[in-house]
Image (spheres, rainbow, N blue to C red):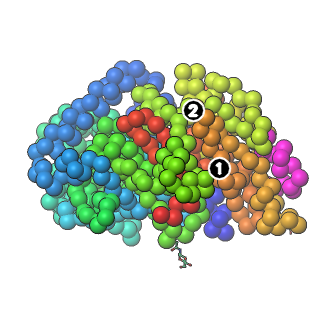
Amino acid sequence: MAGRRLALLLVAVAAAFLAGASGRRASDSARFPLLRLAAPASLADLARSDRQRMAFIASHGRRRTRETAAGSSASSAAAAFAMPLTSGAYTGIGQYFVRFRVGTPAQPFLLVADTGSDLTWVKCRRPASASAPANSSLSPADSGSGRAFRPEDSRTWAPISCASDTCTKSLPFSLATCPTPGSPCAYDYRYKDGSAARGTVGTESATIALSGREERKAKLKGLVLGCTSSYTDPSFEASDGVLSLGYSGISFASHAASRFGGRFSYCLVDHLSPRNATSYLTFGPNPAVSSSHASPSSCNAAAAPRARTTPLLLDRRMRPFYDVSLKAISVAGEFLKIPRAVWDVEAGGGVILDSGTSLTVLAKPAYRAVVAALSKELAGLPRVTMDPFEYCYNWTSPSGEDADVAVPKMAVHFAGAARLEPPGKSYVIDAAPGVKCIGLQEGPWPGISVIGNILQQEHLWEFDIKNRRLRFQRSRCTH
Ligand SMILES: *[C@@H]1O[C@H](CO)[C@@H](O)[C@H](O)[C@H]1NC(C)=O
Ligand SMILES: *[C@@H]1O[C@H](CO)[C@@H](O)[C@H](O)[C@H]1NC(C)=O
Ligand SMILES: *[C@@H]1O[C@H](CO)[C@@H](O)[C@H](O)[C@H]1NC(C)=O
């Protein structure tokens, strides 16, 4: 039953994405970049915002005591830090959660790791006097049994004022409301399914655990942090907020990577793993990412999976998403006939990698070709109906557990001859006891395709922002 509930929620997540992709609204924020394509003027604003944001972060960092600032000294330039990452399946959510400590003294939270957004926010609890007027259609952020950030208890919380350039120019999701110049900068961060998170932004420090011979704690300062006072979607109840891993001037990923080797990596455990199966989100060099060149000195070089490398396009129009150059998809060794435009941003297509999307979404021509090829290979199994999946199979066949071998091999071919060969369970997924479904979603065409977190599972992914490269390799994510 848990399996079924999860599957339905996963679909809800993907459906929300699809619904969002078609219903464009000018007020929507960064979650879907195609919105930004519609308004060229805002693109320029955005590029400018990014630079101002960077400048802001840099100057903010300088004002604070240098000696304790993480990554500010030459010796720590090559340092790394890691944060525990787990599947959120135990809550019924198709997301991965990261443990994050913010404020001084540090307050611990569990946030959704999302490469598709650029605002990091936590649910906030404010003294009653400081609360925004109640809106009965919204859930107050502190209504659940979960944790909430208390900005008043943090020495390092600094509200961003609504009259500041940061608020008016650098945060595309900030609201125009500004009763007095000293009032806090308010946001309305819209996700495309219509859900929203509202609150005020400030800067904060996060506590990180530096990797090394002995673990050392450090502060990462000047982070842009949203203090969410209300949100609309029940899916936000499972976590304490969102950690932004998108590529933008204000995201946590950009901020942390700029101080730690210009890169970050994560390994996603099987999405159905229990909550104690922990992997890591790492900033800086990750020794687990093997070199693309086989090391002759390594005695088991033949056995160790080598990382594949493909360009990370980082197209400005796609921000804050990570777009990649997909060349082809093959099923059972056969390359599928898919119009090249589907993979091409210039032609109305394009492909992004998103940790915050569960099921992979393929634009219609690609989806049709892939499900036709997969279903042809699975034609020997009895079909069952399981809304809203299109192709589901009764896997309780005489071959029983061995049926896993019947999943045809699918490979995703990226530029640079980088081939992703996900395990069968990543695209023919367990939807209910004894039932497997082709776990892909059809996206509109023209439109972007999204490689979701289930297709990314059991792989280590390194986003080398500095060198604009994406590396990935098979991994059980056990270290
Ligand atoms: C409350 O929120 C809804 C939906 O988000 C919005 O349409 C409405 O205008 C808000 N009402 C008030 C009084 O702010
Ligand atoms: C998780 O917990 C279960 C039982 O509670 C245990 O059997 C299993 O070994 C644990 N897994 C990990 C990765 O610690
Ligand atoms: C799958 O097939 C088995 C054996 O024929 C049957 O007992 C079971 O009810 C079927 N499951 C579904 C979900 O249709």
Stretch of the chain drawn in magenta = 373-386
Position of the N terminus, as image quadrant, is bottom right
Q: Is residue 120 left or right of residue 392?
A: left
Residue position marked by numbered label 2 in the rendering: 416
**In-front residue for pair 25/55:** 55
**In-front residue for pair 443/410:** 410
Q: Is residue 41 left or right of residue 388?
A: left
Q: Is residue 5 left or right of residue 216?
A: right
Is 380 included in the stretch rendered in magenta? yes
Q: Residues within 10 Å of mark 1 (few under 14, many from 20)?
A: some
Residue position marked by numbered label 1 in the rendering: 422
Which-is-in-front pick, marks 2 and 1? 2
As shown in the figure, which amino acid type bears the numbered disc 1?
Pro
As shown in the figure, which amino acid type bears the numbered disc 2?
Gly
The x and y percentages for residue 378 are: 83, 50
Q: Tell me the residue at 20%/46% (across/down).
A: 74
Asked if one can make out residue 264 in the rendered structure from this viewpoint, the answer is: yes
The x and y percentages for residue 348 are: 57, 24
Marks counted in the figure total 2
> Does the closest atom of ligand 2 sit within 8 Å of the Cβ of label 1?
no
